[in-house]
Image (spheres, grey):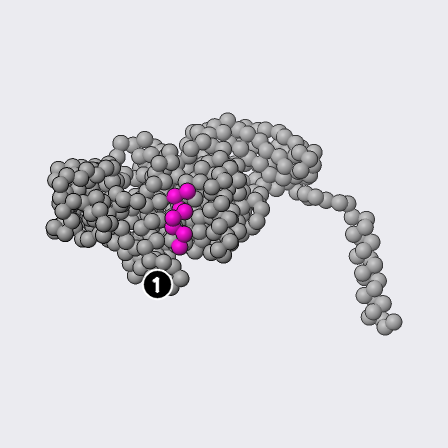
Amino acid sequence: MTHSTHRCRCLCLLLFAIVLTAPAVVNADVTVPQFFGNHMVLQRDKPVKLWGWADKGEKVTVALGEAQQETTADDDGRWSVHFPARPASREPVAITIQGKDYSLAFDDVLFGDVWICSGQSNMEWPVTRTNDAEKEIAAADHPTMRLFTVKRAKTDTPQRDVTGSWGVCSPETVPGFSAVGYFFGRHLQKHVDVPIGLINSSWGGTPAEYWTPTSAFEHDPQLKVTSDNEHAKNVMSTPSVLYNGMIAPLAGLSIRGAIWYQGESNVPMAEHYTKLFSGMIKGWREEFGQGEFPFLFVQIAPWDYRKIAAWPAGGAPIVREAQRNTLAVPKTGMVVTTDIGNVEDIHPTNKQEVGRRLGLAARAIEYGEKIVYSGPMFKSVKFDGNKAILSFDHMGGGLMAKGDKLTHFQIAGQDGEFVDAEAVIEGETVVVKSAEVPKPQAVRFGFSDVAEPNLFNKDGLPASPFRTDD
């Protein structure tokens, strides 16, 4: 045996002896999820739940400002405390968490409204890549707006924590943050005037199945069959993997609501999106256990999906229709983007207006303001001789065309062959007809991948595409 070999063997034996004599430790220190930290916003007007982990049976003392609670970690090492609801406050408070021999302290904690911002790349899209980015970043000085970005995580089982940290909104912290999330929060804070906490949990190129909790598939057999069929076709990975890694850990948080921008990745299986999307929303609400919190989403913008050879043309209008149908779910709102998209780029850069329109929806649906927050939505059709007479909800100050005349209306007779049609506004209706169709049976509006129609209300919000047939 060489001298060096003898030394290596002795060192290994010494390390082995240290391991044998060292005490077994499961949780050496009291810990909390990473979304509890300096500069965080806690939800106002709802009970405050704080939780974490420690050694089994360890006593944990938590102070929120002057208030204090004591608890003991359970057999799994988990502990939690609840404090009474607090109103919005711009005066920061501190939180301390004391274990048997270790403590945590968090400063500059505010009470306001917490919103989760989720979806795929158009939600993930950063402020640096939007219109007037340099100017927007320089002006992003909002001390009572706080930003948290969840690091990407894809797992088969629900996780207990995410990776990320809170930052005060400033020109230093905003550049890489979700542009839609930031512009939504900026609009909201201007009108609601409370601290705003934005949690960006998004991942580009992801279908809604990834973001749907397993419980949603288990509770709805039809949804599970759809998921299983899609998985068998190998068009997606395991369902729920992003919910598990990036949403499930947040489910204990009190929140005000969620905003969502996704749908492009579901164009290849568009016919399933109504069932899937509504199931996802209901699943989130069940898992969070906070009732029907507002869920506000963006209808996908015009884009030429033929750019992806494997994707069928004509799927985008079906997804848009599914999104419009999802408005049947209570406390949902939809932003239409047919006028602010880019048919050459799936990532349009006018995220300011997307955020503003989401803010309008939040102000009306969640905060109870009596404002116009949606463009015209198809309500009903009446066929009268050679004409189709369309009625709408959300007309605001009245219907209008941006341009010389209305565009992107089509009409069909009993044969189902759609042709371009003439459409005019008559009072509170739109009348559609074509010399080629003497007895119309169906109307379609903006019903293509790339349509950029021009029917608006006089409040400047565009009408959602629709069809009267199925």
Q: Main secondary structure of the magenta part?
A: helix
- In the image, the segment drawn in magenta is 268-275
* Image position, residue 93 (x, y; %): 49, 35
Q: Specify whether residue 167 is painted magenta.
A: no
Residue at the extreme right:
1
Q: Is residue 178 left or right of residue 84?
A: left
**Residue 108 shows in the view:** no
* Residue under the point 53% across and 28% down: 83
Can residue 434 be seen at all in this image of the molecule? yes
Question: Residue 125: image x %, image y %?
Answer: 39, 54
Magenta stretch holds residue 274: yes
Q: Secondary structure at mark 1?
A: helix
Which quadrant is home to the N terminus? bottom right
Position in image of residue 190 (x %, y %): 32, 39
Q: Residue at x 41, y 40 (%)?
A: 278
The amino acid at mark 1 is Lys
Residue at the extreme front of the image, as rendered: 415
User: Which corner quadrant holds the C terminus?
Assistant: top left
> 379 or 49: which is nearer to us?
379
Question: In x, y percent, where is residue 62?
Answer: 59, 33
Write the residue at 22% across / 52% down: 418
Residue at mark 1: 307
What number of labels is visible? 1
Q: Residues within 10 Å of mark 1 (few under 14, many from 20)?
A: few
Q: Is residue 117 left or right of residue 468?
A: right
Q: Residue furthest top?
A: 84
Q: Residue at x 61, y 42 (%)?
A: 31
